[in-house]
Image: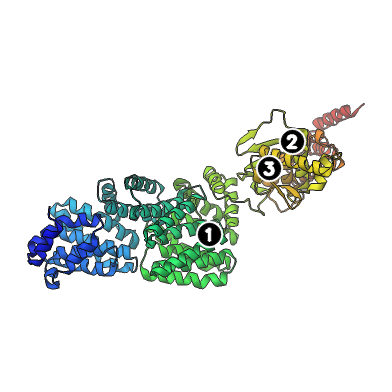
Amino acid sequence: MAKIDDISRWLYAKKWPQLESALCREADGWLAEGRAPILQRLLHAIPTDEREARPWLNYWLGRSLIHTRLPAARRHLERAFAGFRRADDLAGCCISCSAVLDALWLEWDDCTALDPWIDELARLRCETEAAGSPECLSQLSRSAFAALSIRCPGHADLPFWETLSLKRLGLQEPIGDAMLRGLQHMIHYTWGVGDRARSTLVLETLKSKVDKVEQPDFAHCIYHVAHAAHLHWFSDDRAACSKQVKTGLALSERLGQPHWDIPMLNGILYKCCSLEQTEKASSWLEVLRQRIHLQPRPHDQAIHYHFIAYIAWLKGHAAEALPALQQALEIAKASGFSFSPLYYGLALAALRIDQGQWQSARQGLARVRRKASRIRSDNLLFMSHLQGAALAEATGHHRFVSVYLRMALTIGARQRYFAVPWLRREVLARLCVRALNESIENDYVYTLTTALALPPPAHALPETRNWPWPCRIRILGAIRVQHGKDDVNDDGKTASTLELLLAYLVAAGPEGRDTHRLTDALWPDLEGDVAYLRLKTAIHRLRRLLGGTDRVVHAKSRVRLNPDKVWVDAWELERCAGQNDKPLASLQAVVDLYRGTLPPRLCVTPELHYFAQRLEDAFTCLVNQLAGHAEQQGQWQAALDLWRQAAAVADQEPFHLGVTRCLESLGRYRQARRFCLQREAKTLP
C-alpha cells in the first residue's frame, strides 16, 4: 500500500497519474481515520490546472472538505462531476453526483439547488441501467433518496431509490455512510411520511451499527437525532424524548458538533408544545436560539420563528404568533424544503380557527391535505384531519366532526402516533370523547389519552362516561373501585373508616372538604393532632385503594378527590339532574348507573344521610325528565320501561304512579289494576 511519504515524493516529482491512482486507493481510508487535513494539504499543493484536469483529485478534495467547509466542498465536487461527464466516466459521474447531493443536503440551505441534480439523477439512472451497472446505482441510492425525499417526495422515482437505499443500509459499509443513510431515511419516515414500521426498522439498524463503535463520535450524534424524532412521534412515554435529547445535546457539546442540536431541539420543542408545557418549551427555545446564533441557516431560523409563534399561541397571544409564523412560512417556501411549509401551513390554519377565520382555515387545510395525499404522508394527513374535525366542531358542523375524526384516527391507530401538534389539549380531549362515544378506534384513543395525560374536558359531561379514567368510583348502591378495566376487590377487609372517608369526599364534590371538618366527622373523640395523624394515614390508604397518589389531593388544609383522575358515579348523577340541554341518550346512560342511593351502613351522620337523600332526589329528577318527555311524545312503552326501571331500584310513589299511568294509556287496564293491588298488599301492615 502506498504510504504518505511515497505520495509526497510523487507530488514533488509531479508524477500526477501515480499520485491520482494512489489517492484513489488510500483516500477513503484516510477520511475514515479522520486524516482529512492531511489529504487537504496534499491536494492543495497540486497546481490548480492539473487538479482541474483530473476529476478524481477535485473529487477527493471536495470529500475532504465536506464536514468543515461545505460551500467549498460543493464547488470542487461539482467541478469533479463536470470532468467525469466530459470524460464519459459513468462510475465517476455517479459517485461525484452522490457527493454533490450529500453536500447540498448537509448544507441545508437552499433546497431548490437540488433541482438540476434531480434531473441529472434521471439521466444517470437511464445510463447505468443501459450499461448494466447495478453497483453504481446502489452507491448513488442514498443521496438520490435524500434529495428526492426533501425536495419532491411525490416524485415517481422515489420508491425505486428508496428500495435500493434500504437494501444497502443492511450491508457492510463505512460507518459514516451508513449512519448518514439511516438519518436520511429517519427524517423521511418520521417528519416526512410518518411510517412507524420503517422508522423502527431503520432505527434498530442504526443502533446495531452504532453499538459497534467503541468511542462516542458523530455516529452517536446521528443516532440521537434519529432516535429523538422516532420518540416524538411513536413513543407513548412522555419523558422519553426529553431524556434522549438531553443525552444527545451533552454528547454533541462534548464532541464540538453543535450542528446536530437543531433537529433534536426541533423534536423536543414539538413534544413540549404538544403537551402545552410552555415553561419547558420556552427554556428549550432559548437553547435553540443560542445554537442558531452559532450557525444561522434559513431552515433553522424558520424553526425558531415557528416555535416563537407556537409558544405565543399557547399563551393566548395570537397577535404575536401570526407575524412570527408567517415569517417561518415564507422562509420555508423560499428554501424549497418540501415538508416544512406543510407543517407551518397547519399551524397557520390552527391560528385562523382560533381567530374565527373559518374560510381561510378551511382553504389552508385543504391545500395541506392535497399535498399530503400526493406525497403519501400519513402524519400530515393525520394532523390535517384532526384540524378539520376541530374546525367542524367550532363551526357547528357536527356530522363532519365524526367524518374527519374517523379518517384521522384510522391513520393514527395504524401508525400509533402519540404527538398531535397545533391542537389544543382541551380540543383534542373533546374530540377523543366524541370518538369514544361513537366507537371510533377506541383502543387507540384510550392509549392516546393516557399517553398524553389528557384531562377530561370540563364541558363535555356526561359524555365523558367512556373516558379512560385511571380510577372509577361507584358508590350508588355499593362501593366499588375500578382501575382501568380491572375491578379492585377488597375482600371485605376495607376499614369502615376508609369507607366513611371516601363517602365524605364524594359528598363534598370536586372542591373537597376542610381537614378540620373531616377529622371532627371521623374521629370526634380524639385530640386535634392525633386525629390529623389518623387522617394522613387514612389518606395514604385511600390513595393505595384508588391506585395512585394523584387520585387524592391533600393541600391547603383541604382534601379532595382529583376530578381529572377519578370518575364518580354520584357526581355524574348530580351533574345531569335538571340539565335539559343534555342529549336524552346521555341522560338515559346516567339513569342506568343508578343501583340505589348511598349504602345505608354509611349514612351514620346527618350529613351523609342528607347526601343519600340528595342522590335519590337527583335520580327522581332525571327519571321524571326522561319519562315525562317520552309521555309527551306519546311513547308510552318507553315511558313504562323507565318507570319500571326506576321502581325496581327506588321504592317511590311517583314511580309506581308512572307505571300505572302508562299501563292505562296503553289500554292494559287489567295489568294496571293488578299492579295497584300488589302495591297495596305490600304496604299493608
- Where is mark 1, residue-wise? 273
Mark 3 or 2, which is nearer the eye?
A: 2
Q: What element carries label 3?
A: helix
The C terminus - image quarter: top right
**Pointer 1 or 2: first along the chain:** 1
Mark 1 or 3, which is nearer the eye?
A: 1
Q: Which residue lies furthest to the front in this view?
A: 5
Does 568 appear above or below 303? above
> Is 10 placed left or right of 673 in the picture?
left
- Where is mark 3, residue-wise? 589
Q: In which quarter of the image is residue 59?
A: bottom left
User: How far apart in space, not on screen, are marks 1 and 2 (Cα)?
Assistant: 43 Å
The residue type indicated by label 1 comes to Cys
The crowding category of the residue bearing disc 2, from other C-alpha atoms within 10 Å (few below 14, some 14 to 19, many at least 20), is some
The residue type indicated by label 2 comes to Arg
**Pointer 1 or 3: first along the chain:** 1
Res 613 seen here? no
Res 658 seen here? yes
Residue 305 pos. (x, y %) = 47, 69
Instruction: From the viewer's side, name the closer residue of 175 and 350.
Output: 175
- Where is mark 2, residue-wise? 595
The residue type indicated by label 3 comes to Ala
User: How far apart in space, not on screen, are marks 3 and 2 (Cα)?
Assistant: 13 Å
Residue 402 pos. (x, y %) = 55, 52
> Is 487 placed left or right of 309 in the picture?
right
Circles 1, 2 touching at the beta carbon (< 8 Å)? no
> Is 426 placed left or right of 285 in the picture?
right
